[in-house]
Image (tube, rainbow, N blue to C red):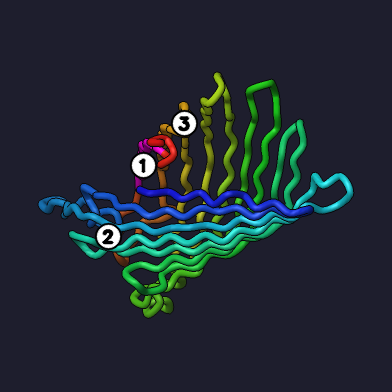
Protein backbone atom coordinates (compact mmCIF):
# COMPACT_ATOMS: atom_id res chain seq x y z
CA UNK A 1 0.00 0.00 0.00
CA UNK A 2 1.00 3.62 -0.53
CA UNK A 3 0.50 5.86 2.51
CA UNK A 4 0.65 9.64 2.17
CA UNK A 5 0.95 11.42 5.52
CA UNK A 6 -0.10 15.04 5.27
CA UNK A 7 2.23 17.36 7.20
CA UNK A 8 0.64 18.86 10.28
CA UNK A 9 -0.51 22.41 9.63
CA UNK A 10 -0.16 24.36 12.86
CA UNK A 11 -1.72 27.73 13.57
CA UNK A 12 -1.69 29.86 16.70
CA UNK A 13 -4.32 27.76 18.49
CA UNK A 14 -5.01 24.76 16.26
CA UNK A 15 -3.39 21.86 14.38
CA UNK A 16 -4.67 20.09 11.26
CA UNK A 17 -3.23 16.76 10.12
CA UNK A 18 -4.24 13.76 8.05
CA UNK A 19 -3.25 10.89 5.81
CA UNK A 20 -4.28 9.18 2.57
CA UNK A 21 -3.77 5.48 1.81
CA UNK A 22 -4.01 3.68 -1.52
CA UNK A 23 -3.37 -0.08 -1.60
CA UNK A 24 -4.37 -3.58 -2.60
CA UNK A 25 -4.64 -6.85 -0.74
CA UNK A 26 -5.43 -10.52 -1.32
CA UNK A 27 -7.78 -12.44 1.01
CA UNK A 28 -7.35 -16.22 1.02
CA UNK A 29 -10.99 -16.44 2.15
CA UNK A 30 -12.65 -13.30 0.84
CA UNK A 31 -16.02 -15.09 0.81
CA UNK A 32 -15.84 -16.03 4.50
CA UNK A 33 -14.87 -12.49 5.49
CA UNK A 34 -18.32 -11.09 4.62
CA UNK A 35 -20.70 -14.07 4.38
CA UNK A 36 -21.81 -15.86 7.56
CA UNK A 37 -21.44 -19.63 7.37
CA UNK A 38 -22.30 -22.31 9.90
CA UNK A 39 -20.73 -25.65 10.78
CA UNK A 40 -23.43 -27.98 9.44
CA UNK A 41 -22.80 -31.76 9.54
CA UNK A 42 -22.29 -33.14 6.05
CA UNK A 43 -21.45 -29.81 4.40
CA UNK A 44 -18.21 -27.88 4.01
CA UNK A 45 -17.76 -24.13 4.31
CA UNK A 46 -17.20 -22.24 1.07
CA UNK A 47 -13.68 -20.82 0.78
CA UNK A 48 -12.93 -18.48 -2.11
CA UNK A 49 -10.02 -16.05 -2.37
CA UNK A 50 -10.04 -12.65 -3.98
CA UNK A 51 -8.10 -9.43 -4.46
CA UNK A 52 -9.35 -6.00 -3.44
CA UNK A 53 -8.32 -2.40 -3.85
CA UNK A 54 -8.32 -0.11 -0.81
CA UNK A 55 -8.63 3.66 -0.58
CA UNK A 56 -8.82 5.41 2.79
CA UNK A 57 -8.17 8.78 4.33
CA UNK A 58 -8.64 10.82 7.48
CA UNK A 59 -8.43 14.43 8.59
CA UNK A 60 -7.85 15.43 12.23
CA UNK A 61 -8.35 18.88 13.73
CA UNK A 62 -7.37 20.00 17.23
CA UNK A 63 -8.16 23.44 18.69
CA UNK A 64 -6.46 24.41 21.93
CA UNK A 65 -8.68 25.98 24.60
CA UNK A 66 -8.01 27.98 27.75
CA UNK A 67 -4.97 29.92 28.88
CA UNK A 68 -2.68 26.93 29.52
CA UNK A 69 -3.59 25.44 26.10
CA UNK A 70 -3.66 21.88 27.51
CA UNK A 71 -7.39 21.35 27.02
CA UNK A 72 -8.37 20.96 23.36
CA UNK A 73 -11.46 20.43 21.25
CA UNK A 74 -10.90 17.76 18.61
CA UNK A 75 -12.66 16.46 15.55
CA UNK A 76 -11.86 13.82 12.96
CA UNK A 77 -13.35 12.43 9.75
CA UNK A 78 -12.40 9.00 8.38
CA UNK A 79 -13.36 7.24 5.16
CA UNK A 80 -12.52 3.69 4.01
CA UNK A 81 -13.41 1.97 0.74
CA UNK A 82 -12.57 -1.66 -0.08
CA UNK A 83 -13.64 -2.72 -3.57
CA UNK A 84 -13.40 -6.01 -5.43
CA UNK A 85 -10.75 -6.59 -8.08
CA UNK A 86 -11.12 -10.38 -8.40
CA UNK A 87 -13.09 -13.07 -6.58
CA UNK A 88 -16.40 -12.80 -4.68
CA UNK A 89 -18.29 -9.56 -4.20
CA UNK A 90 -16.89 -8.16 -0.92
CA UNK A 91 -17.21 -4.38 -1.25
CA UNK A 92 -17.15 -2.51 2.05
CA UNK A 93 -17.33 1.21 2.83
CA UNK A 94 -16.92 2.77 6.28
CA UNK A 95 -17.32 6.37 7.35
CA UNK A 96 -16.65 7.74 10.84
CA UNK A 97 -16.92 11.12 12.55
CA UNK A 98 -15.62 11.94 16.04
CA UNK A 99 -15.75 15.14 18.09
CA UNK A 100 -15.03 15.98 21.71
CA UNK A 101 -12.55 17.31 24.28
CA UNK A 102 -9.05 16.12 25.13
CA UNK A 103 -6.29 16.96 27.59
CA UNK A 104 -2.58 16.11 27.68
CA UNK A 105 -0.09 16.51 30.52
CA UNK A 106 3.20 14.89 31.62
CA UNK A 107 1.14 12.57 33.85
CA UNK A 108 -1.05 11.24 31.04
CA UNK A 109 -3.80 12.09 28.60
CA UNK A 110 -7.53 11.63 28.05
CA UNK A 111 -10.22 12.39 25.51
CA UNK A 112 -14.00 12.01 25.51
CA UNK A 113 -16.67 12.78 22.96
CA UNK A 114 -19.26 11.63 20.47
CA UNK A 115 -18.78 9.11 17.68
CA UNK A 116 -20.85 8.13 14.65
CA UNK A 117 -20.11 5.39 12.09
CA UNK A 118 -21.79 4.15 8.94
CA UNK A 119 -21.08 0.83 7.18
CA UNK A 120 -22.09 -0.18 3.67
CA UNK A 121 -21.89 -3.75 2.35
CA UNK A 122 -22.07 -4.49 -1.38
CA UNK A 123 -22.92 -0.83 -2.02
CA UNK A 124 -26.01 -0.80 0.25
CA UNK A 125 -26.40 0.67 3.77
CA UNK A 126 -25.98 -2.01 6.44
CA UNK A 127 -25.23 -0.47 9.85
CA UNK A 128 -25.18 2.96 11.49
CA UNK A 129 -23.76 3.42 15.01
CA UNK A 130 -23.89 6.55 17.14
CA UNK A 131 -22.97 7.21 20.74
CA UNK A 132 -19.99 8.20 22.88
CA UNK A 133 -16.47 7.07 23.68
CA UNK A 134 -13.62 7.95 26.01
CA UNK A 135 -10.04 6.78 26.37
CA UNK A 136 -7.01 7.74 28.38
CA UNK A 137 -3.58 6.84 29.65
CA UNK A 138 -1.67 7.34 32.90
CA UNK A 139 2.14 7.46 33.05
CA UNK A 140 3.42 5.02 35.69
CA UNK A 141 7.09 5.14 34.75
CA UNK A 142 9.48 6.71 32.33
CA UNK A 143 8.49 4.22 29.59
CA UNK A 144 5.21 2.67 30.77
CA UNK A 145 1.59 3.82 30.49
CA UNK A 146 -1.61 2.25 31.76
CA UNK A 147 -4.39 2.65 29.20
CA UNK A 148 -8.15 2.35 29.18
CA UNK A 149 -11.12 2.96 26.91
CA UNK A 150 -14.90 2.75 27.02
CA UNK A 151 -17.48 3.06 24.24
CA UNK A 152 -21.25 2.94 24.21
CA UNK A 153 -23.16 3.11 20.93
CA UNK A 154 -26.61 2.34 19.55
CA UNK A 155 -26.40 0.25 16.36
CA UNK A 156 -29.16 0.64 13.79
CA UNK A 157 -29.08 -2.30 11.35
CA UNK A 158 -30.67 -2.33 7.92
CA UNK A 159 -31.62 -5.97 7.31
CA UNK A 160 -34.80 -6.26 5.20
CA UNK A 161 -35.26 -10.00 5.86
CA UNK A 162 -34.94 -9.66 9.63
CA UNK A 163 -36.96 -6.43 9.72
CA UNK A 164 -39.82 -8.13 7.86
CA UNK A 165 -40.01 -10.75 10.64
CA UNK A 166 -39.79 -8.32 13.53
CA UNK A 167 -43.34 -9.06 14.72
CA UNK A 168 -42.58 -12.79 14.86
CA UNK A 169 -39.10 -12.44 16.38
CA UNK A 170 -40.09 -9.81 18.92
CA UNK A 171 -37.21 -7.59 17.82
CA UNK A 172 -34.20 -7.31 15.52
CA UNK A 173 -30.41 -6.90 15.75
CA UNK A 174 -30.89 -3.32 17.03
CA UNK A 175 -29.72 -2.82 20.61
CA UNK A 176 -27.04 -1.01 22.61
CA UNK A 177 -23.41 -2.13 22.42
CA UNK A 178 -20.83 -1.43 25.14
CA UNK A 179 -17.09 -2.13 25.14
CA UNK A 180 -14.57 -1.59 27.96
CA UNK A 181 -10.81 -2.25 27.67
CA UNK A 182 -7.76 -1.83 29.90
CA UNK A 183 -4.14 -2.33 28.92
CA UNK A 184 -0.51 -1.37 29.16
CA UNK A 185 1.87 0.36 26.72
CA UNK A 186 5.64 -0.03 27.01
CA UNK A 187 8.60 1.63 25.26
CA UNK A 188 11.51 -0.75 26.01
CA UNK A 189 13.91 1.03 23.63
CA UNK A 190 13.95 4.13 21.44
CA UNK A 191 11.72 3.52 18.41
CA UNK A 192 10.08 0.39 19.88
CA UNK A 193 6.51 0.45 21.19
CA UNK A 194 4.65 -2.52 22.68
CA UNK A 195 1.03 -2.58 23.83
CA UNK A 196 -1.53 -5.14 24.98
CA UNK A 197 -5.08 -4.91 26.27
CA UNK A 198 -7.97 -7.03 27.52
CA UNK A 199 -11.60 -6.03 27.16
CA UNK A 200 -15.23 -7.06 27.41
CA UNK A 201 -18.01 -6.26 24.94
CA UNK A 202 -21.75 -6.58 25.55
CA UNK A 203 -24.34 -6.32 22.77
CA UNK A 204 -28.08 -6.29 23.47
CA UNK A 205 -30.71 -6.98 20.82
CA UNK A 206 -34.49 -7.01 20.47
CA UNK A 207 -34.28 -10.66 19.40
CA UNK A 208 -32.29 -12.22 22.27
CA UNK A 209 -30.39 -14.85 20.18
CA UNK A 210 -28.70 -11.90 18.41
CA UNK A 211 -27.38 -10.50 21.73
CA UNK A 212 -23.93 -11.57 22.92
CA UNK A 213 -21.10 -11.11 25.42
CA UNK A 214 -17.52 -11.19 24.20
CA UNK A 215 -14.20 -10.98 26.06
CA UNK A 216 -11.30 -10.00 23.80
CA UNK A 217 -7.53 -9.48 23.81
CA UNK A 218 -5.39 -7.32 21.52
CA UNK A 219 -1.65 -6.72 21.08
CA UNK A 220 0.55 -4.47 18.96
CA UNK A 221 4.30 -4.22 18.25
CA UNK A 222 5.69 -1.22 16.38
CA UNK A 223 9.39 -0.78 15.59
CA UNK A 224 10.83 2.30 13.89
CA UNK A 225 14.12 2.04 11.98
CA UNK A 226 16.40 4.57 10.30
CA UNK A 227 15.06 6.76 7.46
CA UNK A 228 11.44 6.22 8.47
CA UNK A 229 11.29 2.46 7.80
CA UNK A 230 8.94 0.67 10.22
CA UNK A 231 7.47 -2.73 11.04
CA UNK A 232 4.03 -2.99 12.61
CA UNK A 233 2.49 -6.22 13.95
CA UNK A 234 -0.99 -6.35 15.43
CA UNK A 235 -3.44 -9.07 16.32
CA UNK A 236 -6.48 -9.87 18.39
CA UNK A 237 -8.90 -12.56 19.54
CA UNK A 238 -12.56 -12.27 20.48
CA UNK A 239 -14.80 -15.01 21.90
CA UNK A 240 -18.52 -14.24 21.50
CA UNK A 241 -21.20 -16.23 23.33
CA UNK A 242 -24.76 -15.44 22.27
CA UNK A 243 -27.42 -15.07 24.92
CA UNK A 244 -30.01 -17.63 23.80
CA UNK A 245 -30.60 -20.53 21.38
CA UNK A 246 -31.89 -19.40 17.98
CA UNK A 247 -35.04 -21.34 17.10
CA UNK A 248 -35.73 -19.35 13.91
CA UNK A 249 -32.40 -19.33 12.02
CA UNK A 250 -30.26 -22.04 13.69
CA UNK A 251 -32.67 -24.85 14.55
CA UNK A 252 -32.63 -23.98 18.25
CA UNK A 253 -28.82 -24.09 18.40
CA UNK A 254 -26.89 -21.53 20.45
CA UNK A 255 -24.26 -19.57 18.55
CA UNK A 256 -20.61 -19.18 19.56
CA UNK A 257 -18.07 -17.22 17.51
CA UNK A 258 -14.28 -17.08 17.70
CA UNK A 259 -12.92 -14.10 15.79
CA UNK A 260 -9.21 -13.62 15.15
CA UNK A 261 -7.11 -11.16 13.18
CA UNK A 262 -3.41 -10.82 12.49
CA UNK A 263 -1.75 -8.08 10.46
CA UNK A 264 1.93 -7.59 9.57
CA UNK A 265 3.02 -4.36 7.89
CA UNK A 266 6.40 -3.21 6.57
CA UNK A 267 6.57 0.50 5.72
CA UNK A 268 9.25 2.12 3.62
CA UNK A 269 8.82 5.84 2.87
CA UNK A 270 9.77 7.08 -0.59
CA UNK A 271 12.33 9.37 1.04
CA UNK A 272 14.28 6.24 2.15
CA UNK A 273 15.33 5.71 -1.48
CA UNK A 274 16.89 9.16 -1.82
Residue at position x 74%, y 40% from top?
A: 104
Residue at position x 12%, y 53% from top?
A: 43
Q: Position of residue 138 (x, y in %)?
A: 70, 32
Q: Residue furthest right?
A: 67
Marks 3/2: CA–CA distance: 42 Å
Q: Which residue is mark 3?
A: 227
Residue 261 drawn in magenta: yes
Majority secondary structure in the magenta region: strand
Q: Which residue is mark 1?
A: 261
Instruction: Tell me the element at label 1.
Output: strand
Residue 228 higher or lower than 80, as above or below:
above
Q: Which residue is mark 2?
A: 35
Residue 26 drawn in magenta: no
Q: Which residues are magenta?
A: 257-268
Task: Tell me the quarter of the image containing the C terminus.
Answer: top left
Name the residue nearer the viewer: 148 or 19.
19
Q: Quadrant of residue 37?
A: bottom left
Amino acid sequence: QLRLVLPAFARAASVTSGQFVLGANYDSDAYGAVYTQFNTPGSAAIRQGGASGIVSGRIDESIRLGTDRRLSAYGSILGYDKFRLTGPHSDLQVGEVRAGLSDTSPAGAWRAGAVARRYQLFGSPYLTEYGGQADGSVRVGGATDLTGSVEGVWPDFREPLVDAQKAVLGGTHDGARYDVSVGVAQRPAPGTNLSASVGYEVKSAGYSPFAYRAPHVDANVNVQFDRGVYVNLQGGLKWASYDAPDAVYLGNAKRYDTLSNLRAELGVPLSAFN
